[in-house]
Image (tube, rainbow, N blue to C red):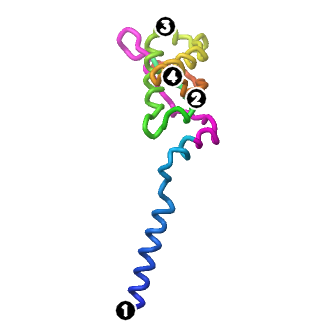
Amino acid sequence: MLRTVFVSIWAIAATVGAVFFFLPSSGKEDKAQLPSILGPEEQKTPVIAIPIFSKKQVSGYFVAKVRYTFNGGLVDPAVTPVEPMIHHAFHKIIYKRPDDEFATPSEVDIEEIASEIMAAVNEQFGSPIIETAGLSDVDYLSREGK
């Protein structure tokens, strides 16, 4: 019986010690120094498929991934996620363009779209949290399969 009591006290002490060991520090200095140590972080969104409409019908999909360099020192990504803002800016920029521009995908200015995405997200935050942006795996999938 005495052995069981000692084992249970040891288990409680080990659990409490593990909790305190793995808790993040609440000091603001640690959080402020972390981005300066790691530097900007290169990230990539999952594939974004944007339907392109022609005559009130879907004529195809503009498909791409957005690569961007995120400066985590200016904003905490856990509090303010950047990816939804990138998706929103990407959709907005694509829908501002004329539909016939995507009929010939080779003529689409990919670098211009990427710089517009970067500018739109930075404008939303009011500070340059995205340092570079680019598009990868870009394709236009026609509804007819041509």
Badge 4 or badge 1: first in the primary sequence: 1
How far apart are the alpha carbons under marks 4 and 1? 65 Å
Q: Residue at x 62, y 38 (%)?
A: 36
Is residue 47 rendered magenta in the image?
Answer: yes
Badge 4 or badge 3: first in the primary sequence: 3
Q: Which residue is mark 1?
A: 1
Specify the amino acid type for callout 3.
Answer: Asp
Q: Position of residue 17 (x, y in %)?
A: 48, 68
Q: Position of residue 144 (x, y in %)?
A: 47, 18
How far apart are the alpha carbons under marks 3 and 2? 27 Å
* Element on which disc 4 rests: helix
Q: Position of residue 107 (x, y in %)?
A: 60, 10
Q: Which residue is mark 2?
A: 68
Give the numbered dot on residue 100.
Answer: 3
Name, please, the residue furthest toward the left.
Answer: 56
Circle 2 Cα neighbour tier, 10 Å, few/some/many (<14 / 14–19 / ≥20) = many
Mark 4 against mark 2, which lies toward the viewer?
A: 4
Specify the amino acid type for callout 1.
Answer: Met
In this rendering, the answer to whether 134 lies above or below 75 is: above
Q: Are marks 4 and 1 in contact (CB under 8 Å)?
A: no
Q: Residue at x 45, y 63 (%)?
A: 19
* Element on which disc 2 rests: strand
* Element on which disc 3 rests: helix
Which region of the structure is painted magenta?
33-59
Q: Residue at x 45, y 79 (%)?
A: 10
Q: Which residue is mark 4?
A: 122
Give the numbered dot on residue 111.
Answer: none
Say which of 101 and 130 sits in front.
Answer: 130
Specify the amino acid type for callout 2.
Answer: Tyr
Circle 4 Cα neighbour tier, 10 Å, few/some/many (<14 / 14–19 / ≥20) = some
Say which of 109 and 74 sits in front.
Answer: 74
Specify the amino acid type for callout 4.
Answer: Asn
